[in-house]
Structures are given as C-alpha cells and as structure tokens.
C-alpha cells in the first residue's frame, strides 16, 4: 500500500485560536498499513502507544480471518511497537472478545503471551464499563472491554495526581490513633481504580462519526495524562478516526498515527483541523454519566 503521510493543520491558518505549534510538532497522520508506517519511525521514541486493534469480528473496516492468523499479525505489530517504545514508556492495548458460534474468546488473554515474549510487563488489566451495546439472547449482554497496560521496565512515567477523581467522603478524618483528626484520604482525590466507566460512542454521543466502534476521547485522556508528560510523543497504530490523536493534542503531546481506511483518515484529519479551530465537540472529562432519574440527567 502506498504510504500517504500528511501533517495536519487548519485549512485557514488565520482562524487559529490556539497557539500555533512548530511544524515538527504538528500531528503526522498516515493512510497506510501500520507495519509500513512504523518501520519508518525512529526507535525508543514514544512514551505512550495506545490503540484498539480490530477484533476480527468481520466489521466493515476489517476482514474476518482465523484467530491464529489474526494473532500472527498482532505479534508483528506488537514487536514493532516494542521497538518504538521509549525506555520509560507504556503500551495500552484495548480489546474486547472474539466471538465464534456463540463462544467468546477474551482477546487480551490470548494476546498476553505475545507481549510477555517481548519482555513487557503488565501493570493493570483495566476494565472499561459502558452502559449500552448489543443485546444477547443466549448469554449475558457484554458491557465491558479491557485495556491492558504494559511497560518496558519498572522505571516508567506515572502521574497519578493528574487522574485522581473526587473521593466518596472527601472530608473523612481518622477518628483515633496517631493521625486522629487528620484527613484519611488524599486531599487531591482518590485513585480511579482499575474499573473505569465512560459512555461508549453511540448515536447521541457528541463525538460520533462514521466509525462504528470509536474510542471516547476522555478514556484516552486519562491514559495520556497519567502515562506521559507534556511534550512527550504518542502513537496510535490503528488510529481510526483519530480519538487518540485528539486526546494527545488536548494535553500538549506530540502525536502520530495511521489507518488503512482512507475515509477514517480523512475524518481524523478533519477532527484535528476542528480542534485547532476550536470547533471540535468532545465529551469533557469528569462529566457525570447520564442518569434519567435526575434532573437534566445529573448534568
């Protein structure tokens, strides 16, 4: 496949309300096979590689192949990601289940050996819970997927304070012992744990595009904020319509990504131009999940 690279900037630079980045910091987006794309990038560079590969379910953007063949491809992609990963970097691989004749295979379990063979270390198996999806009749309806967080070493970038969430009892204090009267929790908030609840991107979501299975930006924001520092490089080798690209740009990271579907790459470029112009709609981090029992859904 021909490699089509493009540094994306607004079509009308005079309508640029954000600080104009240096040319080398503008996002590099490619319509390309990801192995071809990644082989042209320098090694040890990316502090975060975050992606969601096709699940081999026969969606419109993928061809269904035998599971062993899919894993073969994943092994090559993971190997190239390992080459590109910064010594203090993280890989976040988000997947769901492979389904065959009503039987499920949790894809992160069959991917685990591929990452371990590359010397990577699993830090968390994050559960992403969402409230909507297909309804099953012969098994329980699936309402979660996983994000496996891998690091290259024990010395990795980790900014917990950047992603703390409000404590359930923010004013709670120790009532006895040497710390009596002191706050019992961190005043900056609590650790968000390894179960995350974000709405998936359905028809009424402000970020909805033509992609049938896109990332919510706020999910990737949490990964970007906790696993990178300002100015670090982020890569998405299956970028789809660019949600990871947007999340990285929102927090001052340099970023690049690729996808083989031209329509998705064009949507990603359009979203980047909208972000620079200040017109892109995203769901804000920390916004409560809609609750129909509350006034205005609790918003």
Image (cartoon, grey):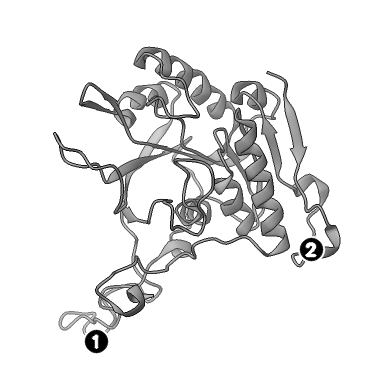
Q: Is residue 77 left or right of residue 270?
A: left
Residue pointed to by mark 2: 16
The picture quadrant where one finds residue 145 is: top left
Percent of width and height locating residue 12: 83, 57
Asked if the residue under mark 2 is in contact with the one under mark 1, i.e. CB atoms within 8 Å, the reply is no
Res 94 visible: yes
Percent of width and height locating residue 278: 68, 65
Asked which secondary structure carries label 2, the reply is loop
Asked which secondary structure carries label 1, the reply is loop
N-terminal label among 1 and 2: 2
Percent of width and height locating residue 39: 66, 22
Give me the residue at 65% from left, 32% from top.
262
In the picture as drawn, the residue positioned furthest to the right comes out as 14
Q: Is residue 124 left or right of residue 247?
A: left
Q: Considering depth in this image, is 140 or 229 the residue closer to the camera? A: 140
Q: Which mark is residue 181?
A: 1
Compute the Cα span from label 1 to label 2. 51 Å
Give me the residue at 16% from left, 79% from top.
177
């Amino acid at each position: 496949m021909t490699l089509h690279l493009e540094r994306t900037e607004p079509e009308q630079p005079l309508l640029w309300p954000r600080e104009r980045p240096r040319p080398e910091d503008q996002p590099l987006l490619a319509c390309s096979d990801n192995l071809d794309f990644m082989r042209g990038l320098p090694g040890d560079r990316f502090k975060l590689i975050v992606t969601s590969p096709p699940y081999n379910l026969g969606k419109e953007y993928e061809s269904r192949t035998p599971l062993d063949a899919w894993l073969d491809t994943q092994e090559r992609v993971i190997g190239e990601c390992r080459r590109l990963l910064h010594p203090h970097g993280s890989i976040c691989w988000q997947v769901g289940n492979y389904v065959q004749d009503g039987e499920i295979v949790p894809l992160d379990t069959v991917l685990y050996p591929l990452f371990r063979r590359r010397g990577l270390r699993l830090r968390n198996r994050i559960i992403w819970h969402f409230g909507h999806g297909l309804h099953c009749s012969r098994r329980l309806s699936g309402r979660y997927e996983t994000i496996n967080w891998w690091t290259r070493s024990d010395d990795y970038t980790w900014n917990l304070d950047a992603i703390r969430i409000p404590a359930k009892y923010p004013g709670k204090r120790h009532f006895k012992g040497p710390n009596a009267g002191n706050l019992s929790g961190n005043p900056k908030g609590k650790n968000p744990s390894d179960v995350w609840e974000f709405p998936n991107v359905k028809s009424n979501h402000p970020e909805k595009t033509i992609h049938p299975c896109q990332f919510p930006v706020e999910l990737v924001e949490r990964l970007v904020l906790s696993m990178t520092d300002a100015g670090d490089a982020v890569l998405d080798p299956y970028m789809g319509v660019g949600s990871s690209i947007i999340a990285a740009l929102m927090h001052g990271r340099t970023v690049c990504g690729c996808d083989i579907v031209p329509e998705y790459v064009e949507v990603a470029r359009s979203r980047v131009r909208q972000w620079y112009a200040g017109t892109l709609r995203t769901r804000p981090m920390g916004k409560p999940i809609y609750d129909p029992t509350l006034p205005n859904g609790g918003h």
